[in-house]
Amino acid sequence: VRSIYSAAKKFAEVLFADTNQSFKKVLLIEYPRKGIYSLCFQTATALEEVQARTSEDVICVFVPTTPNPTSGFIMMIPRSDAIELDMDVESALKMIVSLGVVVPPWVRNGRGAPLAPPGPAS
């Protein structure tokens, strides 16, 4: 029990001590299938062995579960499959913990006025 608690405590310290260091970017990926999108966090880009063996430019992402973002999935995905969001890590975590009830305003790069969602494709 002590080893499980110790590991969980260490994980929580790393995750919540400085989320800007743990999670580099908030991303959107098509998961669990095409046409369904999930929030995730970029955690690493230095994946030389994976990139060499897959011949792809891959990044490591953490896809948290709701409402407990301490559980989830670690995936290595092609960089081209990720959509970078302007959302900050704290806002994304609030959205996940609140089951999507708390949705941050959409602000481009944290600087400008809120943006309207894109219209239908023409």
Image: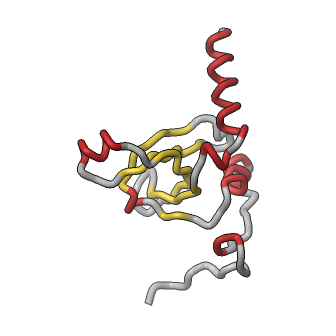
Residue located at (62% from left, 67% from top): 86
Q: Which of the image's four quarters has the C terminus?
A: bottom left
Residue located at (59% from left, 47% from top): 23
Q: Which of the image's four quarters has the N terminus?
A: top right
Q: Residue 18 lies in what quarter of the image?
A: top right
Residue located at (24% from left, 50% from top): 55
Q: Residue 101 lies in what quarter of the image?
A: bottom right
Q: Position of residue 42 (x, y in %)?
A: 52, 50
**In this picture, residue 5 sits left or right of residue 120:** right
Q: Position of residue 56 (x, y in %)?
A: 28, 53
Foreground: 104 or 87? 87
Q: Position of residue 68 (x, y in %)?
A: 67, 38
Residue located at (24% from left, 42% from top): 53
Foreground: 56 or 105? 56
Q: Position of residue 31 (x, y in %)?
A: 45, 53
Foreground: 77 or 99? 77
**In this picture, residue 70 sits left or right of residue 80:** right
Looking at the image, residue 66 lies above or below residue 80: above
